[in-house]
Structure formats: C-alpha cells, structure tokens
Image: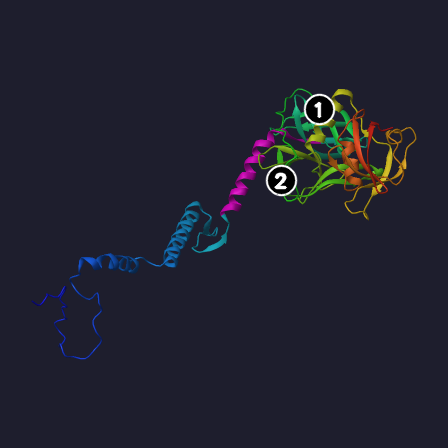
Amino acid sequence: MRKAAPYTLVMPEDEDEGAPGLPPHPLDRVWFHPSELGGAAPEAQAAARPPLWAMLAIAAFCGVVATVGVLAATGAVGSDDSGVGGSSSFVPAFAQLQQDHSADLVSAAGASVVAVRVTTPDATTTDGSGVAVGGDRIVTSAALVADASSASVTTDHGRVVAAKVVGTDLETDLALLQVDGVRVPPADMGSSDHLSVGTWVLAVGAAGGEDRWASQGVVSGMNQLVTVAFGTMMPGMLATDVDTPSRSGGGVLLDDDGSVVAILSRAAPGRAVPIEAAREVAEQLDASGRVRHAWLGIDAVDASSRAGGGAIVQGISDGGPGQAADLHTGDVITSIGEERVADFADLVAAVAHRRPGDPVELTIFRGDRRLRVSATLAERP
C-alpha cells in the first residue's frame, strides 16, 4: 500500500504549475510537520529581533531628546535678551550647577568674612579682609596691619567696629585682631590635607563695607617656600591660579564643602597659608601675642644632583640643635620623622610644622652610609 506524503505543497493560485521560475522557499507553506517546528522557531525569532546597533542608536537618540528637553525647561538653552527667537548662547549644565554652588558657598561663608581697614600714622587707609575664628577674634594679614595706627572691621551687615591688633607673625603673614561690641560667627575650619595640585578652590574676601568678592580656580602648587621683603621666608605655602584683587590679603580659600582650607597672603600674592598653620599661629598669638618658631640650626640647599633629592647641609650654627645632633657639612637630609625631604623647601616646612622642644629623627646620607640621628628643635634666635 502506498504511504501518504507527510505534507502537501500549496502553490500560489496566480501561477501555472508548469511555468518556469525559482523553486518555492521551503517555509512557503501553511502546514508543517511537528518535528520541523523546533528548528524553524529560532530562525523566525532571529529574523524578528532588530540588530544590536539599531537598538543602541534608538536609545542614544532618546537620550539626546530627553537632555535637550531638560535644558530647554531649565533655561540652559534659551534666546537672547531681546526676546527674539533663536539661541545666542549655551551654558553647559555642569557649569551652571558650579556657579550656583559657588554662590551658595559665598553666601554661607560671607557672614564670617569681614572687611578690615587700617589707618597709618600719615592718615593713609588700606583695605583688606579677615575671617572670624571664634568669639571676638579675627585672623587677617600681618602685612596689612603691620604699620597700622588704628584698625576697624566691617561685618557683612555693615556694622563698623574698632579692632585691636593682638599680635602679628611676619613669617606666615598672619595677624590676630580683637573686636569690641560684636560677635562675628566663626568660619567652618576644614583641612588642607586633602588638597593637591588641581584641586578646585573658591577664594572669598571683602571688598569694603558690606561688599564681597569671590573668584574660583585650582591649587597650582603645594608646600612652596616663598621669600618676601627683607629676606623673610614663608614655608609650606599653597599656590593658586585664582584671580584675586590687590586687597585680597586676609581672605579665605574654601573647599568644595565650604570649609576654610587656607588664608590668603598679602605679602605673597597668589599664595595662601594652610589652615593648620594659621590655627597654630592664631592660638600662639592669642596666648602670648607672639609666635615661637622651631629651629634646627643649619643652613642647607637643594640636593638637586642626587637621585631622590634631599637637602645638603652647608652650615651648622654653634650651639644649635644640628650641632648637638652631630650633623656634618655635606650630610644630605632625606626625611624628618615620616615626612620626606625632597629639597630645601621641604626641610624648612617640616621644621616649621613643629614647635620648639619637639624631638625629631632625621634620616641622612653621609657619603654612601645611611644614618638616623636624633635632634631636639629649639626656638629660633
């Protein structure tokens, strides 16, 4: 007996059976054997799925449309002031957010930043800034008040009060003032430990009276040794590219959280004293009206020709800590405690961070020998 065919081909009605042409596609039929369904389904699904590049292109297009819609709604894309249609400028969203953030920081810190005006014996007046550090104490620039016969402070509300100079320290260009009859809210003191070259900072100061100025930029240098008038060396200074006015001395550098991380110097424009050093100076000035600076009792220069750097001892003061520690001319100091000494600036800063009487351990190279010597810092004569 002849067995029936498992399926039947159905030809299109408008074609003749004997007409020449391409054979029909194997799937061009209306009935399939159950055993064929397992292999045909995946092929059909693959044919129905759009290619990956098309899916990504659609997603990207939707993202662009959504972004433009948000910018248009917030005014980031807009017309010019004349009201005539058409865009005259485009402010990136992140830039607008940064501007708003800076304005908030100035507003928050403004109450703690005051205008300082000093009058010299010849009746010349000079303006600068200051920042409240607690109670009736204001920190400002020593160069600003050094020759003052009188000084006054103007708060952010426009109140003018007399100020007394408690003490000054030329090495850090910092001075401490005492104000009468007013309590200025102290600034939020942060830390400079997290700063590095390229860190964003905001400079804020007083322009006189109730006016404030602000300028943003980045830290452009760390731990710099700056020599100012009369050979005074200022160690451990921060450098910034912030564009500040000539009266910026005594202003502050804020970090992204709005905390004070440094005090701007008038004696060294473009530089600032890290807040840790400023707090130490303010405490000593408040306690005794003067600052005691640590001293190692040596002269040194950069060991620029030595791999790894260091500071080469060139002179040793009689009776000083260096002599007591048996340092020799030609010794190369490479660290003080845990602080690496890459050059003379590092050496001066490492000593400046300490107080007279502090014990220190020095790592030195004497010829090819690596030695550790102990010294006790003294007060600079």
- In the picture of the structure, the residue carrying the numbered disc 2 is 201
- In the picture of the structure, the residue carrying the numbered disc 1 is 162
**Sequence-first tag of 1 and 2:** 1
Q: Residue at x 66, y 26 (%)?
A: 133
Magenta residues span 93-116
Q: Amino acid at mark 2?
A: Val
Task: Tell whether 241 sits left or right of 23.
Answer: right
Please tell me in which quadrant of the rendered image residue 368 appears: top right
Seen from the viewer's position, the closer of residues 118 and 70 is: 70
Q: Is residue 59 magenta?
A: no
Q: Amino acid at mark 1?
A: Ala
Residue 217 percent across, percent down from the top left: 63, 44
Which image quadrant: the N terminus?
A: bottom left
Q: Is residue 104 magenta?
A: yes
Per the picture, the main secondary structure of the magenta-coloured stretch is: helix
User: Disc 1 versus disc 2: distance between alpha carbons?
Assistant: 31 Å
Which image quadrant: the C terminus?
A: top right
> Up-down: is 13 above or below 212?
below
> Up-down: is 378 above or below 82?
above
Q: Which of labels 1 and 2 is toward the front?
A: 2
Task: Tell whether 328 sits left or right of 281.
Answer: right
